Image (tube, rainbow, N blue to C red):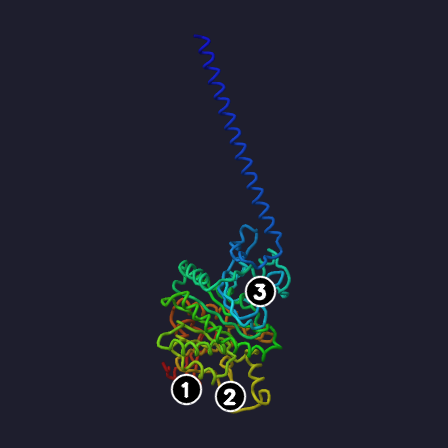
Amino acid sequence: MEAAMRERAQAEARAEAEMEARQRAEAEARARAEAEMAQREMAQREMAMAEPAIMAGPTASGACIDSAGYGSSFDCVDLFFGTNRNEEPSEAGQVLFGGRAAGKSTLGVVTVTVPIERLNMPGSPVKKLSNANQSVTMADRDEYFAIWGWDEQDPTSFRRLVGAELAAATEYENSALVFVHGFNVTFRSAAFRAAQMKFDMDYDGPTFFFSWPANGSTLEYLSDQDDADISVAPLTDFLQLVRESVGEDTKIYLVAHSMGTRLAAQAINRLSLIEGDDEPFFERSLFAAGDLDRELFRRWIEPARGLVGELTIYTSSDDKAVSFSRFLRTPGFGSSGGEDVKSRIGLIDQNLGPSIFDEAMTIDITDVNTGILSNFFGVNHADYVESEVTIADLEALLRGGAFMPEARNGNFVRQCYNGRPYWKYIKGGGAPDNSCVLPF
């Protein structure tokens, strides 16, 4: 009896010891696994911190999630693009396309990192590394706009990704933004500008930009105009794809800048021949600092007026880039008067006044930046987004608020020129001139 009890006790003790041994082994295995996982995560974090640049590749844009894991302060901004530029990637991953027409178009998604410090500086100038071919460190991304990576897409995957971002939007529902850049702009700079607009407005709808093969040099002005004109068909195709991607019920907003207004106006005219102009293609359009002859604007836009939607024109008397364009084009290098003056829609002409068109809101934004650097050293060609005033106005347009300029900003004061109304930004406001009747 006693022997049986001793054997039972010994068996229970052995079983208990074996269970404790198994538990210790399992605990040690878990600890080793957790330690190995922690080491892998640390190694990945250190690798990311040490990586001087993210190479463009098929999964590059998807890797940019947020900056917290890198100990940095930047946000990732995804943009949809179309371009007819030649592909010309650099080792540093910051130059993706060159300045020559490729003979075909490329679709894709490009990811731009934007310094978080911009949260307190909407409308401030875009800071970028001066050398586009140098590698970008994580510390650089805290201070400068930079390319993270890009993915080429076919039309089917492009439409699918657009649909996903459109469905996820909560701040700007059923809304899409299209940007067409101007002269002397590289693909990289166009991406940065589109990212700036999206970031500064906290815009969560899909943002598109079309990058035509501008050369990125002030010495290539005439070449850039040719490149803009041969890009009309590719832009038209891209706009049709944008509409297919977002659906008929989504409101598309257009921002065209500088020589991009020339390209956009021709593409809109071509769209009217394809689709008619009974229904607006764009909900609202902004033509900013337009390097476009007034008569060409009328010729291209008036037959297609129904597609443009509610139209705003930003003009200025101090845009040195558009002023130089007028100088180059006018006989006698700007000295010719009368009808020979090649007036631009983005420049207030001393003889012809501001460009005023029926059913368009022309706003003189000369004084939105009045600092010494702007007045004496600035070109003032980017005031359409490099000002708290204009970036807030663009946001108001995209949020679908009132369209009349004085309702968008009390400092947009109505003026009259030859009996026709336009608006001028006057800091602090002023008395409107109501002597001219609104033609709409």
Q: Residue furthest front?
A: 103
Dot 1 falls on a residue whose secondary structure is: loop
Q: Amino acid at mark 1?
A: Gly
Residue at the disc numbered 3: 96
Q: Amino acid at mark 2?
A: Asn
Residue at the disc numbered 2: 351
Q: Nearer the viewer, residue 86 or 323?
A: 86
Which quarter of the figure has residue 373? bottom right
CA gap between label 1 and label 3 equals 49 Å
Q: Please say if 415 is above or below 340.
A: above
Residues under numbered marks 1 and 3 in contact, where contact means CB atoms less than 8 Å apart: no
Which quarter of the figure has residue 177? bottom left
Residue at the disc numbered 1: 419
- For the C terminus, give its image quadrant: bottom left
Residue 303 spot, x, y in % from top left: 40, 82
Residue 44 spot, x, y in % from top left: 58, 48
Q: Nearer the viewer, residue 106 or 398?
A: 106
Q: Amino acid at mark 3?
A: Leu
Left or right: residue 312 versus residue 377 is left
CA gap between label 3 and label 2 equals 43 Å
